[in-house]
Image (spheres, rainbow, N blue to C red):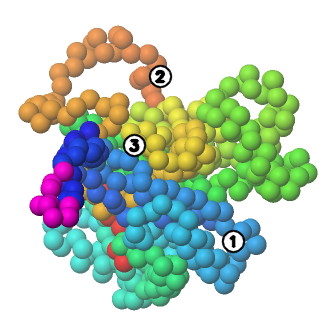
């Protein structure tokens, strides 16, 4: 917008009255009608790399302000004494070289510091649940819970035999571990606004775009394939119901290629990365027939990928028999491995629901990101993006979603079904599905008289509700 405003120039002439000369000069004014707010930086400290992302809200939309990534040197990744100072130095460099606004961060608690237990409690009033669970926590953790941060997250009601119980997820982090972690971050110059949980941040990147009332009953399945471990997160609508860690990650794929082809880990990592970038997200046998190298890499990693698929399948079956209701329609793969056509092909063959690469930044303005950072699906930014949304409370407009109608009536609680026509139109695969088998079929159900307390991946990613986390 160009607005012409008068500029007043005063000139004095000898023996004469000062005259005023008015000239017209152009002044450009940028007017933004919608107020924006820059959010804290999402800080994702992984095993082999660090990612930082900062976004701003502009009305009901999101835009990336800045992002950066750094690789952690291989010689310090498994050395706790050297890893902490090295990470602090890298974060300090990213602050200095990036275009971030401020140094406020939201960071995920490292998986090895987080302890998770699942309890099945009787149905008791909500105001009594916290005290009851914290009392039980003294007996289920190996450390003194009086010297730890404890949070409870109701996962939902489950049926155990003829009884209905409430499943509760208990998160615990010892004070000494959290304080040591914060001290390392403070050395980097970061101001920690909040400490979050990985699974919660991953799900938030999906949940913040749920706007329509009918979408609040959809079941979402997210699988983040990390370097050393993978995390399965299942939730309905805005709430997380199930989380489990699986000890299989990209490191195991690189190691399999290294051993089969007789090359180093760095060479295997680079080879797999080139193959993924050459054909991201394209799964099919044609790729193998045309490329002998791709076929060799697939043969080396196939068994490990199939094992990951079996573990994910067990998680889906457990969710189906534990939490009754709507079933998931698809699985979204996140992390650096999400665009691997070989992994997508194996998982699609192993699971009963379709698998696709997640696109967490699909509805976000990424024009300010470097071209190298916004290639492909950008699934590797999911955790940093979700962490950056920690302090938000509302929802944002999805690019491909329908506008929400606040006057729309709620969905009916019951639907009339013509059972004869339904049976006539059904196929065998519709009548009998793997996910509908009883708990005894896979050994995951508690059955009648089962134990009321179960353990879930003591050092894995933790479940959470609507963005709840362990606050600093």
Q: Residue at x 28, y 43 (%)?
A: 26
Nearer-N-terminus badge (3/2): 3
How many neighbours does mark 2 have within 10 angstroms: few (below 14), some (14-19), or many (20 or more)? few
Q: SS class of the residue under badge 1? A: loop
Predominant SS of the magenta segment: loop
Q: Is residue 75 left or right of residue 188?
A: right
Q: Nearer the viewer, mark 3 or mark 1?
A: 3
Residue closer to the observer: 252 or 6: 6
Q: Is residue 282 left or right of residue 30?
A: right
How many neighbours does mark 1 have within 10 angstroms: few (below 14), some (14-19), or many (20 or more)? some
Q: SS class of the residue under badge 3? A: strand
Q: Which mark is residue 364?
A: 3
Residue closer to the observer: 266 or 126: 266
Quarter of the figure that contains the N terminus: top left
Image coords of residue 328 (percent x, y):
40, 37
Q: Which mark is residue 77?
A: 1
Q: Which mark is residue 429?
A: 2
Residue closer to the observer: 392 or 351: 392
Residue closer to the observer: 348 or 289: 289
């Amino acid at each position: 917008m160009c607005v012409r405003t008068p500029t007043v120039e005063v000139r004095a002439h000898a023996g004469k009255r000062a005259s005023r000369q008015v000239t017209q000069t152009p002044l450009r004014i940028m007017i933004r009608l919608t107020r924006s707010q820059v959010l804290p930086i999402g800080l994702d400290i992984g095993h082999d790399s660090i990612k930082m992302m900062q976004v701003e809200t502009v009305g009901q939309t999101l835009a990336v302000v800045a992002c950066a990534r750094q690789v952690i040197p291989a010689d310090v990744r498994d050395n706790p004494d050297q890893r902490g100072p090295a990470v602090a130095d890298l974060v300090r460099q990213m602050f200095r070289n990036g275009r971030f606004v401020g140094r406020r961060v939201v960071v995920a608690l490292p998986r090895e510091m987080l302890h998770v237990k699942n309890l099945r409690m009787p149905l008791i009033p909500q105001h009594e649940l916290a005290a009851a669970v914290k009392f039980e926590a003294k007996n289920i953790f190996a450390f003194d819970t009086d010297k730890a941060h404890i949070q409870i997250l109701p996962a939902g009601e489950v049926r155990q035999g003829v009884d209905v119980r409430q499943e509760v997820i208990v998160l615990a982090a010892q004070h000494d571990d959290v304080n040591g972690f914060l001290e390392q971050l403070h050395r980097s110059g970061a101001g920690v606004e909040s400490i979050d949980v990985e699974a919660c941040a991953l799900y938030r990147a999906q949940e913040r775009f749920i706007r329509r009332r009918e979408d609040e009953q959809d079941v979402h399945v997210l699988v983040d394939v990390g370097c050393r471990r993978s995390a399965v997160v299942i939730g309905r609508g805005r709430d997380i119901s199930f989380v489990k860690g699986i000890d299989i990650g990209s490191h195991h794929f690189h190691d399999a290629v290294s051993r089969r082809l007789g090359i180093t880990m760095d060479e295997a990592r680079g080879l797999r990365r080139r193959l993924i970038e050459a054909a991201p997200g394209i799964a099919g046998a044609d790729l193998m027939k045309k490329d002998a190298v791709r076929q060799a890499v697939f043969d080396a990693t196939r068994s490990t990928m199939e094992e990951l698929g079996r573990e994910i399948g067990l998680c889906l079956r457990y969710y189906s028999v534990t939490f009754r209701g709507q079933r998931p329609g698809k699985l979204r793969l996140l992390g650096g491995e999400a665009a691997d056509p070989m992994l997508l092909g194996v998982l699609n063959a192993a699971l009963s629901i379709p698998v696709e690469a997640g696109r967490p930044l699909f509805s976000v303005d990424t024009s300010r990101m470097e071209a190298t950072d916004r290639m492909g699906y950008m699934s590797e930014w999911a955790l940093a993006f979700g962490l950056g949304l920690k302090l938000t409370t509302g929802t944002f407009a999805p690019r491909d979603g329908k506008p929400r109608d606040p006057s729309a009536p709620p969905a009916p609680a019951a639907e009339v079904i013509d059972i004869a026509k339904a049976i006539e139109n059904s196929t065998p695969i519709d009548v009998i599905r793997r996910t509908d088998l009883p708990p005894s079929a896979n050994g995951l159900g508690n059955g009648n008289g089962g134990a009321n307390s179960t353990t879930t991946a003591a050092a894995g990613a933790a479940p959470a509700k609507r963005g709840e986390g362990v606050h600093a």
